[in-house]
């Protein structure tokens, strides 16, 4: 079959269960697409055909024995920030270009238990620091909708792989918008869960109090299938919260849009720099939800001016602490012929880390240094609590909050962003991570250049089922999530 890549996760599962095709045939189909198309997109860092086909054969055997799960034999791509046993795990950095993980991240291990077939590891901004996927040591990933544009970041490889139909769904991580923004730029659905919902064990840390793994796929339904695999408590992760995960697929129609109160922050929609096409598409999507029975409620989020300075103190400070382990001694890149230990540290880190990572380490180290810790880092944590309280107050009168996922559509590779655009982009995404809330991106149309536009819906804690359900119902009434870039239409 030449069109297997056009099937939804449910259709793939049903096809495998009904023996319309085998997991080996499905896996070979995706591997052929990757071999033919990915040279243009550059979404994969590592492709693992031998391991993928071995997993596919094992999945087919399970199907034959009647012991298969619903996702047994379905392929997946993992962001190269999740450790994978026996496979190179780089985090997009020269520092880890030679690192073969001796264990699986919990997300990867749970995928294996579910019977998922790992196609490979996909590209990302170095150590998840960036919003374009251009800071990767392995080169920039391209946006399948326009190959001279960025796919977003840091989960740009995940987004590009799914948008080019080089994987049916993919794992991503979100520290300040790194699932939602690339999903917006590539016309996908992407869910950032509540902090603590998905295990961070084996997920290479950027900012430990902000990082969260989540699913990226074409539709809310497809995301729900992967979320069923990813979610759940993990004793090996001290930040994992012991709150029972839902059956996200079963709950896809559990929330009624009729009577849903959607908050519209006036601060988000009345700021210079928001692209006119983006604003128009988002407002059209909200009008559609209103037609479906939702009520739009104007709200105030009064802490918006504090989002950027708060985030850019906390995230680099945590990055400075997390990345000190990469010292050229235990694993990872080591400089050649160091003259002494100090030289080993200095050159290994300056040669192994890219400019953006070095910049954030320096900012974070300064913020944590003696004499500045109380003035900057402690104060930022206090403001963070105020930001959280601002959201919780809003949720007293609304069920979820709507915003653009990004102020613009994807911009060209190599283009420098206007500071106002950078500011707006941060406003729409990073506050969710500072507060630990769940949020989802849904594709809602295109701009004048036929680049995708995304709507962001922000929920209260543990409301992933509600977010997926609302977007699923919106997607039953619209077809934006079914649109494909021309490169995705190529056959093999």
Image (cartoon, rainbow, N blue to C red):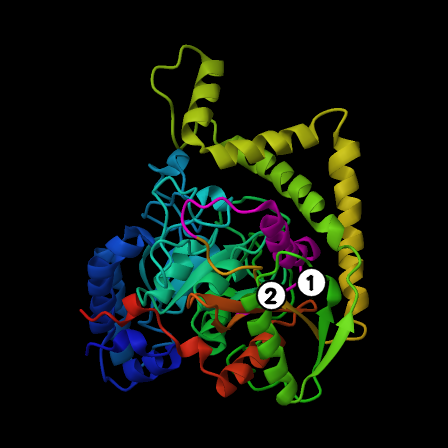
Near-viewer residue (237 or 80): 80
Magenta span contains residue 419: yes
Going 54% across and 77% down the picture, which residue do you hit? 248
Quarter placement of the C terminus: bottom left
Residue 216 picture location, percent across and down: 46, 65
Magenta span contains residue 310: no
Give left or right: position of 115 versus 220.
left
Quarter placement of the N terminus: bottom left
Give left or right: position of 319 versus 265.
left
Near-viewer residue (268 or 162): 268
Residue placed under numbered mark 2 in the picture: 404
Q: Is residue 53 visible?
A: no
- Residues marked 1 and 2 touching at CB (< 8 Å): yes
Q: Residues within 10 Å of mark 1 (few under 14, many from 20)?
A: some
The span from disc 1 to disc 2 (Cα, nearest Å) is 8 Å
Going 42% across and 72% down the picture, which residue do you hit? 218
116 vs 46: above or below: below
- On residue 268, the disc is 1
Magenta residues, start to end: 412-441
Mark 1 or mark 2: whose residue is earlier in sequence = 1
Residue 386 picture location, percent across and down: 80, 53
403 vs 259: above or below: above
């Amino acid at each position: 079959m030449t069109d297997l890549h056009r099937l939804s996760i449910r259709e793939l599962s049903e096809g495998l269960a009904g023996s319309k095709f085998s997991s080996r045939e499905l896996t070979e189909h995706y591997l052929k697409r990757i071999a033919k198309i990915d040279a243009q997109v550059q979404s994969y860092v590592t492709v693992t055909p031998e391991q993928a086909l071995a997993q596919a054969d094992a999945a087919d055997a399970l199907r034959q024995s009647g012991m298969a799960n619903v996702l047994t034999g379905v392929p997946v791509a993992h962001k190269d920030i999740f450790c994978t046993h026996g496979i190179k795990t780089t985090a997009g950095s020269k520092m880890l270009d030679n690192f073969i993980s001796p264990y699986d991240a919990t997300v990867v291990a749970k995928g294996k238990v579910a019977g998922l077939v790992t196609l490979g590891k996909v590209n990302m901004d170095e150590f998840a620091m960036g919003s374009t996927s251009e800071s990767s040591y392995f080169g920039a990933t391209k946006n399948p909708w326009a190959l001279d544009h960025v796919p977003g970041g840091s989960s740009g490889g995940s987004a590009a792989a799914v948008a080019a139909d080089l994987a049916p769904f993919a794992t991503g991580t979100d520290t300040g918008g790194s699932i939602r923004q690339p999903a917006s730029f590539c016309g996908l659905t992407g869910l950032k869960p509540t902090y603590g919902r998905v295990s961070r064990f084996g997920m290479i840390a950027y900012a430990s109090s902000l990082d969260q793994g989540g699913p990226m796929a074409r539709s809310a339904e497809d995301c729900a299938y992967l979320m069923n695999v990813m979610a759940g408590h993990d004793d090996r992760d001290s930040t994992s919260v012991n709150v029972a995960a839902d059956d996200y697929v079963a709950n896809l129609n559990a929330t009624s849009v009729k009577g849903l109160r959607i908050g519209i922050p006036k601060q988000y929609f009345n700021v210079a720099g928001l692209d006119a096409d983006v604003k128009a598409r988002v407002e059209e999507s909200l009008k559609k939800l209103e037609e479906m029975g939702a009520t739009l409620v104007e709200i105030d989020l009064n802490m918006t001016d504090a989002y950027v300075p708060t985030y850019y103190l906390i995230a680099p400070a945590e990055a400075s602490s997390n990345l000190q382990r990469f010292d050229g001694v235990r694993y990872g890149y080591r400089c050649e012929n160091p003259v002494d230990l100090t030289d080993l540290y200095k050159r290994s880190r300056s040669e192994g880390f890219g400019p953006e990572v070095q910049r954030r380490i320096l900012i974070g180290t300064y913020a944590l240094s003696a004499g500045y810790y109380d003035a900057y880092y402690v104060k930022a944590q206090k403001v963070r609590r105020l930001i959280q309280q601002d959201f919780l107050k809003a949720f007293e009168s609304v069920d979820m909050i709507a915003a653009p996922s990004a102020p613009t559509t994807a911009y060209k590779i190599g283009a420098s962003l206007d500071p106002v655009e950078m500011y707006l982009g941060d406003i729409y995404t990073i506050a969710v991570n500072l507060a630990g809330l769940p949020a989802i991106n849904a594709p809602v149309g295109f701009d004048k250049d036929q680049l995708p536009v995304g709507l962001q819906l922000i929920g209260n804690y543990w409301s992933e089922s509600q977010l997926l359900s609302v977007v699923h119902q919106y997607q039953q009434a619209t077809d934006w999530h079914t649109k494909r870039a021309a490169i995705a239409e190529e056959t093999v």
